[in-house]
Each structure stands twice: as structure tokens, then as C-alpha cells.
């Protein structure tokens, strides 16, 4: 399996599962981060995650240009872990970018990836309907991105309470 999407809710264990899967593979480990340190809490969160990953990992930041990062970083001897598509979708939405076009570019980059690729995303469609237009648009856009990526990858795993469930 060369490409894998790991879905789950917040604090479901999806990122830890994805990291464990990546570390079990041969090759250089590259963490493609989509989060941005826009406040002190997020800066602390990012620092903790970097420390948890340890020195084996190279970090590449790609809050908007994710397809370009996949294209430039993917090699046969590298494992790319993208965490996460949900933050990437948020970044695109807030930057008023064309999300369908960005998703299509990402799908093309996934198809062309030279080495293993693991992508992480939140499943945002299991809760209540958001109470405002922006939140509803976000949920819809994130859901569409997840569907497109799930269709494009070799495997999909849903993680709940730290337990993986193979979907594809």
C-alpha cells in the first residue's frame, strides 16, 4: 500500500496511528505540516508535536501549497506524513482560495507520488449541523476533500478511541 488516508475525530489517535505506520516503513521520514502557529497555544502544540516525533523526522511546512510540497518532497526513499488535511482546508477557506482546484492538484500529486504517502484528516461530518454559514461551508468543504482523497488513495483507516478500523 503506497498511499493511506487516516480519518478520525479530534483526539481519536489518528495522528499517533499514522506516525506509527510511517515509522514502520523504510526510508527517510518527512512530516508535512499544514498547521500554522497563529497564537501561543498553537505554537506550543506544534512544539510538543515536533518533540514527540523526535530527530528521525524532517518537518516541511505547507499550510497552503500542499500539492507543491508533495511533488517536491516525494521520493522513493522517503515516507511523507501529511497532518492534516482538515487544517489545510481551513487555511484555504480563510485565505479565500479555490478549494476544489487545490484538492484536484493534491489528488494529482498523490497519484504521482514516488514513495509512501500517509495523509491524516478529521472526520467532521459525524456531529451536529453547525449553526453558522462559515462553519457549515467548512464542514462541507472538508467532507468533500476527504471523499476525494479517500477515492484516490490505496487504503483508508478510520480511528476511534485509538482503535483502527479498515475502510478500504
Image: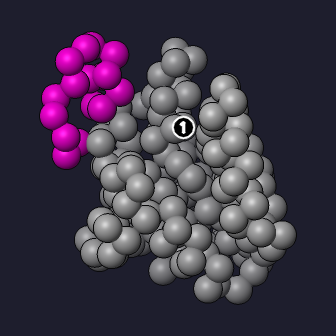
**Image height check: is 114 above or below 111?**
below
Instruction: Reply yes or no: does residue 52 show up in magenta.
Output: no
List x then y, in percent, for residue 99: 46, 28
User: Residue 68: in sight, yes or no?
Assistant: no
Instruction: Please state which of residues 40 and 158 is positioned toward the viewer in this rendering.
Output: 40
Callout 1 environment at 10 Å: few (<14), some (14 to 19), or many (20+)?
many
Identify which residue is drawn at 69% across, 65% down. Answer: 52
Q: Of all residues shown, which one is farthest toward the left?
A: 128
Q: Secondary structure at mark 1?
A: helix
List x then y, in percent, for residue 120: 48, 57
List x then y, in percent, for residue 10: 38, 50
Instruction: Please state which of residues 163 and 113 is positioned toward the viewer in this rendering.
Output: 163
Identify which residue is drawn at 34% across, 16% down. Answer: 134
Q: Report the quarter where the C terminus lies.
A: bottom left
Left or right? Give the position of 85 relative to 149: right
**Image height check: is 103 above or below 114?**
above
**Image height check: is 70 above or below 13?**
above
Q: How many marks?
A: 1
Picture quadrant where residue 66 is located:
top right
User: Residue 134: in sight, yes or no?
Assistant: yes
The residue indicated by pointer 1 is: 88
List x then y, in percent, for residue 9: 33, 52
Left or right? Give the position of 92 relative to 123: right
* Color scheme of the displayed model: one colour
Picture quadrant where residue 80 is located:
bottom right
Left or right? Give the position of 44 relative to 127: right
Identify which residue is drawn at 67% across, 56% down. Answer: 49
Identify which residue is drawn at 41% across, 55% down. Answer: 11
What residue range appears in magenta?
125-140
Amino acid at each position: 500500500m503506497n498511499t493511506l488516508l487516516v480519518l478520525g475525530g479530534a483526539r481519536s489517535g489518528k495522528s499517533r496511528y499514522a506516525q506509527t505506520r510511517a515509522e514502520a516503513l523504510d526510508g527517510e521520514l518527512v512530516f508535512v505540516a499544514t498547521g500554522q502557529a497563529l497564537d501561543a497555544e498553537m505554537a506550543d502544540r506544534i512544539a510538543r508535536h515536533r518533540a514527540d516525533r523526535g530527530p528521525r523526522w524532517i518537518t516541511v511546512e505547507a499550510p497552503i501549497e500542499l500539492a507543491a510540497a508533495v511533488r517536491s518532497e516525494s521520493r522513493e526513499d522517503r515516507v511523507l506524513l501529511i497532518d492534516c488535511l482538515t487544517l489545510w482546508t481551513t487555511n484555504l477557506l480563510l485565505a479565500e482560495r479555490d478549494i476544489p482546484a487545490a484538492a484536484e492538484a493534491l489528488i494529482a500529486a498523490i497519484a504521482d507520488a514516488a514513495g509512501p504517502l500517509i495523509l491524516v484528516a478529521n472526520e467532521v461530518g459525524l456531529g451536529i449541523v453547525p449553526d453558522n454559514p462559515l462553519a457549515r461551508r467548512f464542514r462541507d468543504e472538508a467532507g468533500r476533500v476527504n471523499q476525494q482523497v479517500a477515492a484516490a488513495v490505496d487504503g483508508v483507516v478510520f480511528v476511534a478511541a485509538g482503535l483502527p478500523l479498515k475502510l478500504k
